[in-house]
Structures are given as structure tokens and as C-alpha cells.
Amino acid sequence: MIFTLLSIELYKIFKKWRTYIGFLAFGVFIPILIYGVSQGGNHYQRILERNLGDQFLIVGNLLNGWYVAFITIQAMIIHIPFFISLVAGDLFAGEGTAGTYRMFLTRPISRELVVITKYLAGFIYTLVFLIFFALLSTLPSIYFLGTGDLIVPLEKIVVIPSSEIIWRFLIAYFSSFISMCVVVSLAALFSSLVNNSIGPIVGTMAVIVIFLIIGELPFELFEKISPYLFTKYMTVWLEAFDYPIDWSEIIKSLSILLAHILLFFSITLLSFRKKDILT
Amino acid sequence: MEIVLETKNLTKKFKNIIAVENLNLVVYKGDVFGFLGPNGAGKSTTIRMLTSLIYPDSGEVYLFNEQLKPNSKSVLRRVGAIVESPDFYLYLTAYKNLEILGRLYGITPAKNQIMEILEFVGLSNRWNSKVKTFSHGMKQRLGIAQALLHNPDLIILDEPTTGLDPQGMKEIRQLVLSLSKEKGKTIFISSHLLYEVELIANRMIIINKGKKIVEGYVKELLDRERTTYNFNLSNLEKAKDILISLNLEMNKDFRINGSELEISTQKISASQLNKIFVQNEIEVYSFYPKRSLEEFFLEIIQGQK
């Protein structure tokens, strides 16, 4: 029954227009970004080379396809969570709004199974979306802009040799997937509590944005709170571009994120089991 | 008689409001069971408990002698239901909705099976249309189709004619009757349209404020009280005098109402009254029983207030 339910959930997700908003947005944005970089990157590249040239031996084009892929992966912080919460926030609440709970839950299926399959469907949607995002942000940019070493201009400048780039991106995308599953879980939890998907979408984004801001404020109180906010660990994918990679930090962050997924899932399960369907 | 549905002391509260209180009812195999009550009486809450959409605070629901529990819902395989207005996935076709809802019963309905059901409810020509293009009446019929898809033994219909025009109401009534007579289904139908239940149900229960008022066979419940007839006659005053002179101990129970004489009696039948008038050279243009479930219902409900 679980596969039947899962296939039905996926069918419903991929039949909705809102599911494709994220695909459409990045399908338009990334080609524009590639085109923009290819047209006007020389000035920016000269600045980078001037700053780095006496410290590093740069091989190839700095504004290459990998660099564009690195720029686009920053969307994992706000933009992709938004598109994911658009779908995940509708997982339960959409049934409430449409009144289809009355059709769905009068069948001989357990509510636990409903929660499990809705979560799994949310995770699968996220996986599909991230694969699409990863392919779109790497393949065309590499085709049009070429390859080379990757400059990572964050708190410190890291130059990643081209031989290491692919597996580092794979780690980054895998870590991003776990981070985005936390977003799915939180949005699904909110979605299970109400009967309108606007609240879960806005609520999820509000939590993420507020936690991110609190986590970045340079005040003692917020610095103490910061380790307890799951958003601190959602940028774990950045660790894949550090040198050397701090594996213990990646494992710790992923463990905390997985614990949050389990927590949100458990709360959803408990509340949905007892929920009175009144819509 | 085989019991198909039974509730024992079913109770549900929403905060301080008691929606259903100690409700006991029994539905037998083959019944068309009318579930009556004014708006807010607790009908939908009861039906939601019967279909496990909400869970009772206390009391039990038995379907086919098996208790319905949150973690034991397999018995729902034998039940088809429409709870309030049937809502579907509007972005899917009628066919796809039925296929999905059928699969949730653990069956994969064949195309001809779905088409047969759509034919039965008169929607076969719209099988490939998205439900968002359907009228309310069409959705109601599709609701009945989804309730029948897995060939259930018990069909629960919650106010299935609400919002329909008279033609649509008639069609649904005929559909319910054919389900009962031709397919031998047990039907539990709630309504606040009392004449509707009078037309199709053999047994019924009336609830008000979450409590059972009366339960039994429709015919018995109606016959138990005295019946009122309205006679349209050529001479109302003469007819009235005749009834008084016959000393039928019903002097206070008849009155002239417009062009009709309204007679409320327990002791004399309509045919006897008709004979008396004709023998006394009073032309009888028409007569009809006014006694109906509606009156009965209103009396009971008013008695509760």
C-alpha cells in the first residue's frame, strides 16, 4: 500500500502548477546568469586575478562554469527553501483546502501511512528539484564558460583545483538535499496543523529568515542561541568548499539536520493521528 | 436481522459544546436508513465518526460487528461514503479521480469498471473532463460513483441532495432507490429534507442537539400518531355540521382552512370520511393526507425546545 500511496502523492504533486514554479524560475535565471557572465566578466576577472595572482597559481579561466555553479548554489539559503516550501506547505493543507481529506481519510488506510508517504513524496520532489538545479547550474555553464580551478570567495579565499571540484560539488549537493529535507519537514509539519497552505509557506520562510538573522547577529545573546537554531547547520554544504574539508563538522551538521527531520516528522505524526477532520 | 452499523453511547465534544451525546443507533442489512435532524443537530459529526474522520470522545462504532478504531480501519473496505459535499482533485479528470480513490481501497479498478460506474451515475460522457469543469450536481453524482467503485455493502450519504435543483434531487433519490432495490445495498442517508427521507427510507432516526429523539420504521412512526386529511368539498359548512351531528368525538379536531376542511383523526379513515360526505350529497373534489414526516419531525423538534 505504501507504494500505491506514494505514487498517488507524487502524481498529485507533479500535476500541480505550483510544483513547476521553482523549475521555471531557475530555468530562466540560470541561462541569464550564464549569458551575463559570458558577456561582462572580464573586468571582474581582472580584479580577481590582481588580488590573487601573487598568492596563487591560477590555471585557466576564473569565471568558468564551476564558478557560476558555485554562485547559483548560494540559492540554497533562501530561494530554494521558498520554492520547496511552496510544495511542502501544500502537502497536507492542500487536502484541507480542497476538502479531499474527506475522500482520502475515509479509506481503509492508516494516518501514519498517510504522513509517511506525504513526507517521502516531499523528499522525492526535493531530490528531483535539486537534480534539475544541479544539472542546470553546471552543464550549460561548463559548456558555455569552460572549466578550470574554482575560486571560493567567502570568509577566506579558497582555490579548489579542478581535479577536486566534481566530488566537492557532489558533497555540497548531497548536504543541500539533507538541508532542504529539513525545510520540507518543517513546512509539512505546519501544513498538517492548518487547512490553508499560505500559512505553512509563510511560516516556514519566516522561521528560516528569522533564525538566519538571529544566527548572524554579533551579540552575545544571539551567539549563545545560534547553536540551537537548525539554520546554523543548513549551510553545511559550504563546508564542501573549504580547504581542508572539516569532515567532523559536516557529520555533526548532517546529524543535527537529520535529528530535526525526525523531530518535525514525529510531531506531525502525533498531531495528525489525533486530528479531527472538520473541513 | 444482520446488523451492519451500530453505535454505542457515541459521544463527541468540541471544547464545551457537546455535538453528539450517548447516541445509540442500529442499521440492519438492506435498510435505507434515514438520519434526520435540523441543522446543527450533530448529523455530520456522527457521520464523521462513522467514517473515522474524527474520533469519538467515548462510545464505539461497530461496522459489520467489527469495532472501528484509529489503528484498525480495514472494515472501511466494506463502506462507501460521501461526507458533506464531495470534493475531488479539481485538476484531475473524473476518471483519474476515481482511479486514485479506488486504489486507496487497495484495488486497481479496471477501465471498464470505472466506465460502468460513470455510466451508472450518468457521467460516462464526461469521463475525461477535469472535475473543475463539473457542476455541483455532477460532483454529487461523481461522489456517489466513488462511493460505489469498490462495491461496498454499506453506503453512507451525507445530505447528498444539498444544493441540487429539483431535477437533480429526483435523480439522486432514484439513484439511491436503485442502489437499494437493484443492488441490495444498505444505505445510511442523512438529510434535513424530511420529505426526501419519507420517500426513500424504510427506517429512520431523528436526532436533535446531539441526542436521539426517536428511532424506528418510518411507517410505524408516522402511523403511531393521528393523521390529518385535507378535504376539498363542495360545501364545507354542511360537511362540518355532519361531522358534529355524527358525534365522532372529534369536534375540536377539524377546522375550515381556506377552501378545505382539515380533519385530524385517529379513529376514522379517509375512505370512511369520503363515503360519509358522498352519502350526504357533498361533492368531494379531492382529499390528501397532510400527516407527513415533516409535521412529525417539526412537532418533535418543537417539543424539544
Image (cartoon, grey):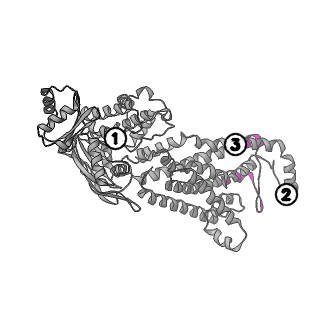
Q: Nearer the viewer, residue B223 or A91?
A: B223
Q: Identify which amino acid the numbered label 2 is placed on.
A: Leu
Range shown magenta: A140-168
Q: Quadrant of residue A17?
A: top right
Q: Nearer the viewer, mark 2 or mark 1?
A: 1
**Crowd tier of the residue under label 1, counting other residues whose Cα lies within 10 Å: few below 14, some 14–19, many 20 or above:** some
Q: Is residue B40 magenta?
A: no
Instruction: Indicate which disc residue A139 carries.
Output: 3
Report helix, strand or loop for mark 2: helix
Q: Give the residue pinned by disc 1.
A: B193
The x, y position of residue A44, in whole percent, is: 85, 50
Q: Is residue B110 above or below residue A79?
A: above
The x, y position of residue A4, in whole percent, is: 43, 43
Q: Is residue B87 left or right of residue A77?
A: left
**Crowd tier of the residue under label 2, counting other residues whose Cα lies within 10 Å: few below 14, some 14–19, many 20 or above:** some
Q: Give the residue pinned by disc 2.
A: A52
Report helix, strand or loop for mark 3: helix
Q: Identify which amino acid the numbered label 3 is placed on.
A: Leu
Report helix, strand or loop for mark 1: loop
Disc 1 is attached to a residue of which chain? B
For marks 2 and 3, the one nearer the N-term is 2
Marks 1 and 3, how far apart in space? 65 Å
